[in-house]
Image (cartoon, rainbow, N blue to C red):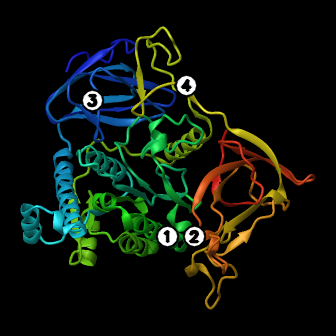
Amino acid sequence: MSGADNSQDRAHPREWVLNAETEYRFELDIGTSFAIKLIRGQAEIFGAELVEGKTYLFYEECKAAVYTWIGCTIEVIGQPSTEYVSEETPMAAYANVHLALEAMRVKTLLHAQIAASPDTASPEDLQEDAENGPSDSPRVLILGPENSGKTTLTKILLNYATRAGQDWCPILVNVDPNEGGPMLPGTLSATPIPSPIQTSTPAHTLGASATSAPTHMASNALLPFGYWYGHAETKRNPLLMDRLIRNLGENVWDRWDADIIGRSSGLIVDTPGSFAASSGAHSDHRQSLIKACIDAFRINVILIVGHEKLNVEMQRAYGNKLSVIKIPKSGGVVELDALYRARVQKYQMHSYMYGERVTPPPGMPPISSTQSTIRYLVGGEQSTDMTLAPSSAVVNFSDLAIWRIGEETMAPTSALPIGATRVVSEMQPLPVDPAQAGSGLYNAVLALIAPPNPDDTERYDEEILDLNVLGFIVVTALDIPNKRMTILSPSQGSLSGRTAIVGSFEWQE
């Protein structure tokens, strides 16, 4: 390592020389940015390969690591709060998991192709298929406690799959409402991943789908399909979580009906830390939600990240039916507190509406500079001014049908008096009147949902639970005397006749 003296002026480039199978870890503070350029060798960030000579920008409290298999030299500019090189990483174990999953994909695709066209298969392929027998694509559930690196492992395995040169397009399933995946927090989603997910900011940990961004951006290739849960915590409404997980599973399998490559690519499910919480007043729902994931996505591999007790528990429950594998936790995992997570959610919401204005670290020309010969990469894309222009419009209360699922504060069934039953079920849609005091709509984040299927002749009470999310809006003002409200939306368009669901997330300026 050279140029690592902390007293050195961080506005000037510094070089770090990394040996084979080591990683450079860094953490950023609020309001700071950081630049990394690969000078020579090979390097990757969470499985996404860095291009030699390109300058990558990181910002908004990003915490990441540059790993190299063969050794490399990187140049950095900026002042992270923490930076160091580690020689102890779990990447060899993660790579072995990838190779096992890759073998499942190849075997599944070969069998599917032979089954579809047995007359055109080569004798070698027929013999190999007969010897190996039918296979199943990898459908992976990742479990572990908070701050164990589940999302990082998810990203690494997805990125390695997309880099394998087989045109794989695995599906990222996110059932952590605190994170939101490529959509906003509060959403459960399934997203086909055609290319590596880049890292630049915690606002897009698992990629981002464009709203009103230019169509040439790679983020437009991410097309998530999601349902609105509306809360950060799974304990708020576990019955609703269960239903939405099963809805996602049905959608994934419908998508795979005529997609051999997609089905062979498989899927990876990222889960919240609450799925691993074995104690506490609200841990009783986690087993049912784990089972919902296993059933809905027909899971055949469970990866346990750094949790011995959970590994034993899953082995006992599912070890005779599917593969349960314990893998090590990275020493670079950072403990994230509630305030940090709240700031990340704010970043995600603001990015959805306004895009992002990235300021390079001191000593580097701004992105908008036409004089600069430096071409920055942000999130793996050529950086431009990525600010968006959301639309603010005044609509009548009657234009938009707003619903809330269950009561605003739902006590667990065990807390009810003996013999008492609920007046409102956890999954009952309740209409929200904006004119009523205490409607909870001011600064509320609303999910716009798809209209009912016109082919369905019969309507049912809980139908809106099974309708997917089309986008998000925010109520920024209520004019109760005139029965009007101001709506902030990422793009223009009429809201008349639309349906929205409100949860517990609030917009923060």
Residue 448, percent across and down?
Answer: 65, 57
The amino acid type, in three-letter code, at marker 4 is Asp
Q: CA distance from mark 4 to mark 1?
A: 38 Å
Which residue lies under the disc numbered 1?
Answer: 247
Evaluate if marks 2 and 4 touch, with contact meaning CB atoms under 8 Å apart.
no
Left or right: where 424 falls relative to 84? right
For residue 469, above or below residue 32: below
Evaluate if marks 3 and 1 touch, with contact meaning CB atoms under 8 Å apart.
no
Q: Residue at x 44, y 11 (%)?
A: 363
Res 35 quadrant in image: top left
Q: Residue at x 50, y 31 (%)?
A: 30
Which residue lies under the disc numbered 2?
Answer: 466
Q: Residues within 10 Å of mark 4 (few under 14, many from 20)?
A: few
Q: State the SS at label 2.
A: helix
Evaluate if marks 2 and 1 touch, with contact meaning CB atoms under 8 Å apart.
yes
Q: State the SS at label 4.
A: loop
Is residue 280 visible to the viewer in this orientation of the structure?
yes
